[in-house]
Image: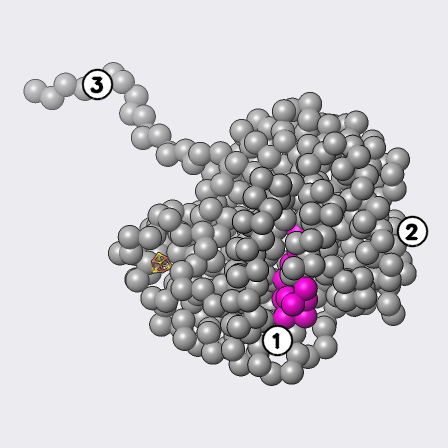
Amino acid sequence: MTQRSNQVAVAPPVPQVAPPLAALLELTHRCPLQCPYCSNPLELERVQAELSTEAWLRVIGELADLGVLQIHFSGGEPTVRHDLVDFVRHGAERGLYSNLITSGAAIDRGRFQELVDAGLDHVQLSFQDAEAKSAERISHVRGIQDKKYTFASWVRESGLPLTVNAVIHRQNIDHVDDMIALAVKLDAARLEVAHAQYYGWGLANRAALMPSRSQLEAVTRKVNIARETYRGRLVIDYVVPDYYAQQPKSCMGGWGRQFLNITPSGKVLPCHAAETIPGLQFDSVAHHSLGEIWQNSQAFQRFRGTDWMPEPCRSCDQREIDWGGCRCQALAIAGDAAATDPSCAKSSLHSKMLSLATGEATATAPEFRYRRFSSAGGVSPVTQVADSRRNLD
Ligand code: SF4
Ligand code: SF4
């Protein structure tokens, strides 16, 4: 005789994904600068599409509820948002460590002090070059260097730690020693020497940015010497260009494992370049909670973990170290976001990637294609940046 249980069958629990450690909030795509390596998408989001103050405040609260530890205010240029102080204050109230990633070109001293008073924890300031004329040419903004020096002095006077971000490419790579000296002079605690990444505008300008292997080797030597020289005074992080690598970097610490990115209009992405990948569906904070998106969104599930991996990644002992590398790069080079990252020596496209790099690095550099909003419709991206419209047009 069979016995009927009077217990209701319970579905097995869906495994929960650990919360992200950090979130990048792209508050706006507006920016007074026009860097040709900008990681923003070619199709920039308009001011009319940006999330409201209330929506961002809700998002920051949800990030805290989710267990996120750090929020990075980015863009575009985040200081063009008039409500940035409110966001910093709310983050501080909710116990989030906040970092401002800025060009320093669109803020005055009073407003910076408001950010400090609201609880800002850290500032990352970008430099396009150590040499002022070159910095003007790369950013396409006249007088940019003096503005940055002044801003850096405000940061240090406030007592906040300063990181200098130096994006390196073939048109400024010979000035890396000066960039290091600049970071020391500005009393930065950290310098990030990062070779340009080839997504978004960087991919569109790859031939104008790609260094040669000998340039790369020279800068690597210089960075290693400087690390010794400034030990205890300046920490130098160094990001090499993937095109000359043998093994990919663990992009974002693995897809959907540690990090999320929110665009100005509220789309939640596993990485800032993920929109280049066709077939991914990005949920918006306007329609879903961040917790739901982090756990269940198709875009996060697609390349999370190792089940999606093809060979040779599937049976590789590095698969839970580099997580198969960068999906956006696989798309850009292999035409398939699910392919092994071609920067890996085990990829069948590794030599193609290398010859692409060496071919571009040795040819004459083309003109920069500057980061600009398309002329179709919409408001000027810099309408709120009264002090920084002196670009080189
Ligand atoms: S990379 Fe340059 S253009 Fe892009 S957001 Fe940063 S400062 Fe602006
Ligand atoms: S085969 Fe895949 S997992 Fe192994 S090192 Fe290369 S990219 Fe990483």
- What residue sits right under mark 1 in the picture? 207
Label 2 packing within 10 angstroms: few (<14), some (14-19), many (20+): few
Tell me the distance, in whole angstroms, between the alpha carbons under discs 1 and 3: 69 Å
Tell me the distance, in whole angstroms, between the alpha carbons under discs 2 and 1: 33 Å
Q: Nearer the viewer, residue 249 or 172?
A: 172
- What residue sits right under mark 2 in the picture? 386
Labels 1 and 3: the sequence-earlier one: 3
Placement of the N terminus among the 4 image quadrants:
top left
Identify whether 187 is placed above or below 58: below
Q: In the image, is the residue at mark 1 within 8 Å of ligand 1 by its beta carbon?
A: no
Q: Amino acid at mark 3?
A: Ser
Residue 101: percent from left, percent from top: 70, 45
- Residue 249 appears in which quarter of the rendering? bottom left
Identify whether 69 is placed above or below 243: above
Labels 2 and 3: the sequence-earlier one: 3
Tag 2's secondary structure?
A: helix
Residue 170: say if magenta.
Answer: yes
Q: In the image, is the residue at mark 3 within 8 Å of ligand 2 by its beta carbon?
A: no
Labels 2 and 1: the sequence-earlier one: 1
